[in-house]
Image: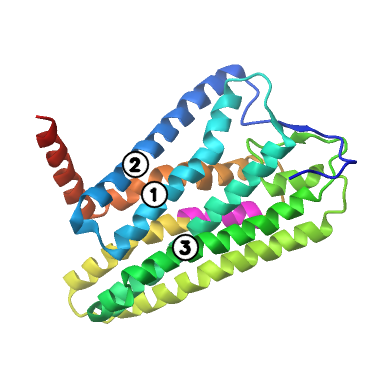
């Protein structure tokens, strides 16, 4: 990923979250805790889903892939953030910056597609329960996950090609804690109008391509739930998709704010990025485990199994 020869900048300076050493020390402990919780929570979900045969269903197959994505997504940004919080000089090479842009897009993009697939899975389970096993076959589940990775990879390559063709001449301060295209574009001495238009179109297409299936799936789900006469039945049906709704709102809400709103270097830019890249990956295992009786039961069974093994 070589830049054109007349680009004179070889590295960028990140302003980070604060320039006060005391605040940075506190933030480093906070985000270290968040990262450790993210690792523990998502690794636990992966272990429990793999170890307990009761969870070998399409819903938990997608959830295990979501946990893997959250591990990857958080690891793209948080270790670098922790390093910078403990360093006086917060720099990143141009190549490293572009690599970070690529991996942010591929992990976040795949997660967006996967959340859309999970919405369709909930639609099939609630609206067509008798045909669920036939509709959501193992082969289809694997194909949907591979398609999510493939489409996100294609989008990421297109996005990074926009950044590779930029020239960086003088400005090298990124008013952010990580490399993201909305923060990178203002530093370029090239004409970025077309790049911004392509980024907005890509974000809208990606957003609509994942949001519309979610919208139509949940429109049918709500309609089906409201037609259930039993209050207990409605409550049980809604509980199976409420966790997914919470995770989806947290992820899409902050992501769209970051990539569709003009970059201002304000605290809103930082908060929206922190929300979808650090906080949401930590919360997803909690959301899906605390609100899910099957996961709670599986955790207990897995713990008993391993305790007996070590005795």
Q: Residue at x 32, y 77 (%)?
A: 135
Q: CA distance from mark 1 to mark 3?
A: 16 Å
Residue that mark 1 sits on? 67
Disc assigned to residue 198:
none
- Say what secondary structure mark 3 lies in: helix
The residue mark sitting in front, 1 or 3, is 3
Q: Position of residue 32 (x, y in %)?
A: 46, 28
26 in relation to 73, above or below: above
Residue that mark 2 sits on? 43
Q: CA distance from mark 3 to mark 2?
A: 21 Å
State if disc 2 and disc 3 touch (CB < 8 Å): no
State if disc 1 and disc 2 touch (CB < 8 Å): yes
Image quadrant of residue 59? bottom left
Q: Is 35 on the left or on the right of 302, as rendered? A: right
Q: Is the stretch drawn in magenta largely helix, strand or loop? A: helix
Q: Residues within 10 Å of mark 3 (few under 14, many from 20)?
A: some
Q: Residue at x 39, y 49 (%)?
A: 67
Q: Quadrant of the N terminus?
A: top right
- Say what secondary structure mark 1 lies in: helix
The magenta segment is 250-260
Residue that mark 3 sits on? 146
Q: Position of residue 163 (x, y in %)?
A: 75, 50
Q: Residues within 10 Å of mark 2 (few under 14, many from 20)?
A: some
Q: Residue at x 33, y 61 (%)?
A: 242
The question of residue 258 being in magenta is answered with yes
Image quadrant of residue 98? top right
Q: Residue at x 44, y 67 (%)?
A: 144
Q: Position of residue 20 (x, y in %)?
A: 62, 20
Q: Is 248 on the left or on the right of 59, as rendered? A: right
């Amino acid at each position: 990923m070589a830049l054109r020869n007349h680009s004179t900048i070889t590295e960028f300076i990140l302003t980070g979250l604060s320039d006060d050493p005391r605040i940075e020390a506190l933030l480093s402990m906070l985000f270290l805790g968040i990262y450790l919780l993210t690792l523990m929570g998502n690794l636990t979900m992966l272990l429990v889903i793999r170890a307990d045969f009761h969870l070998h269903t399409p819903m938990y197959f997608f959830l295990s892939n979501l946990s893997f994505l959250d591990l990857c997504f958080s690891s793209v940004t948080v270790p670098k953030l922790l390093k910078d919080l403990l360093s006086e000089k917060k720099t990143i090479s141009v190549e490293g910056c572009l690599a970070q842009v690529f991996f942010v897009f591929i992990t976040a993009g795949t997660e967006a597609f996967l959340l859309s697939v999970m919405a369709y899975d909930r639609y099939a389970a609630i609206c067509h329960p008798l045909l669920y096993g036939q509709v959501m076959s193992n082969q289809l589940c694997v194909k949907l996950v591979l398609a999510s990775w493939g489409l996100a990879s294609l989008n990421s390559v297109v996005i990074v090609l926009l950044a590779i063709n930029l020239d960086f001449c003088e400005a090298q301060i990124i008013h952010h804690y990580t490399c993201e295209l909305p923060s990178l574009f203002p530093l370029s001495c090239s004409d970025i109008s077309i790049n911004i238009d392509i980024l907005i179109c890509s974000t809208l297409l990606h957003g609509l391509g994942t949001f519309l299936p979610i919208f139509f799936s949940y429109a049918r789900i709500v309609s089906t739930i409201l037609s259930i006469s039993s209050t207990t039945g409605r409550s049980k049906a809604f509980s199976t998709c409420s966790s997914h709704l919470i995770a989806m709102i947290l992820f899409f809400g902050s992501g769209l704010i970051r990539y569709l709103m003009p970059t201002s270097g304000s605290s809103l830019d930082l908060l929206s990025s922190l929300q979808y890249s650090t906080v949401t990956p930590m919360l997803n295992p909690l959301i899906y485990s605390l609100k899910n009786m099957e996961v709670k039961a599986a955790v207990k069974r897995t713990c008993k199994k391993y305790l007996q093994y070590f005795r």
